[in-house]
Image (cartoon, rainbow, N blue to C red):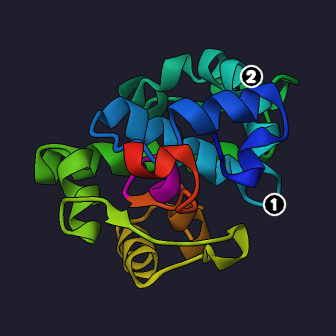
Amino acid sequence: MKSCAWGTTNPLMLEYHDTEWGVPVHDDQKLFEFLVLDGFQAGVSWSIVLNKRKNFRKAFHNFGVKRIAKYDAQDVERLLADAGIIRNRLKVLAAINNAQRFLEVQKEFGSFDKYIWQFVGGKPIKNKHKTLKDIPATSPESDAMSQDLRARGFQFVGSTICYAFMQAAGLVNDHVVECFRYKQV
């Protein structure tokens, strides 16, 4: 079976590629997890984030958005002392801020899912890329998502981060056409 070349670099990346990447997500907690993880990915490789994912889940109370929205200075210091995650003060503060903004979006739209999927018309965009080089870093949809999230006060949500989020959460199918997962998702 052919696979996307990036998904074969290590067992964890292979499992993520084969089971999660590009699969449409409609669960708010999972969407929040991807939003946080993609924010922490800024400036580092996804494999680093993926290798620390279990630690992130533990440190961030399994991405319980209501709990994270209430984090205080002690929680920030706890997270910055946790060698199991990426220890970046701006990213930690952004995760807390984004939890608060996430709850506001849920209140306004009924769910974050309903809000975020509007950027792709409610269904995944199915691209037809032949090689990894063909896959863009941004799209008009990620530009619009980024702009709207920023206007709502979210942080670490530039267009590139939004596009990575869209790929992870299945808003876009960027498996190359020869990959066995392309038709599955």
Against 74, residue 91 (above or below) is below
The quarter holding residue 123 reads bottom left
Q: Is residue 45 visible?
A: yes
Viewer-closest of 184 and 57: 184
Viewer-closest of 126 and 165: 126
Viewer-closest of 30 and 183: 183
In this view, the mark in front (2 or 1): 1
Q: Which quadrant would the N terminus be assigned to in this image?
A: top right
Residue that mark 2 sits on: 78
Image coordinates for residue 128, horizontal then vertical, percent: 47, 72
Q: Is residue 169 magenta?
A: yes
- C-alpha separation, residue under disc 2 versus residue under disc 1: 22 Å
Task: Name the mark on residue 64.
Answer: none
Q: Residue at x 39, y 42 (%)?
A: 184
Image coordinates for residue 108, horizontal then vertical, percent: 13, 53
The quarter holding residue 48 reads top right
Against 95, residue 167 (above or below) is below
Q: Residues within 10 Å of mark 1 (few under 14, many from 20)?
A: few
Q: Amino acid at mark 2?
A: Arg
Image coordinates for residue 152, horizontal then vertical, percent: 35, 67
Instruction: Mark 2 and mark 1 in contact? Answer it, CB < 8 Å.
Output: no
Q: Amino acid at mark 1?
A: Gly
Residue that mark 1 sits on: 43
Q: Residues within 10 Å of mark 2 (few under 14, many from 20)?
A: few
Question: Residue lying farthest front?
Answer: 1
Residue 27 lies left or right of residue 9; in this view the side is left
Against 47, residue 148 (above or below) is below
Q: Secondary structure at mark 2?
A: helix
Q: Residue at x 36, y 28 (%)?
A: 66
Q: Residue at x 62, y 53 (%)?
A: 39
| Residue extent of the magenta highlight | 165-171
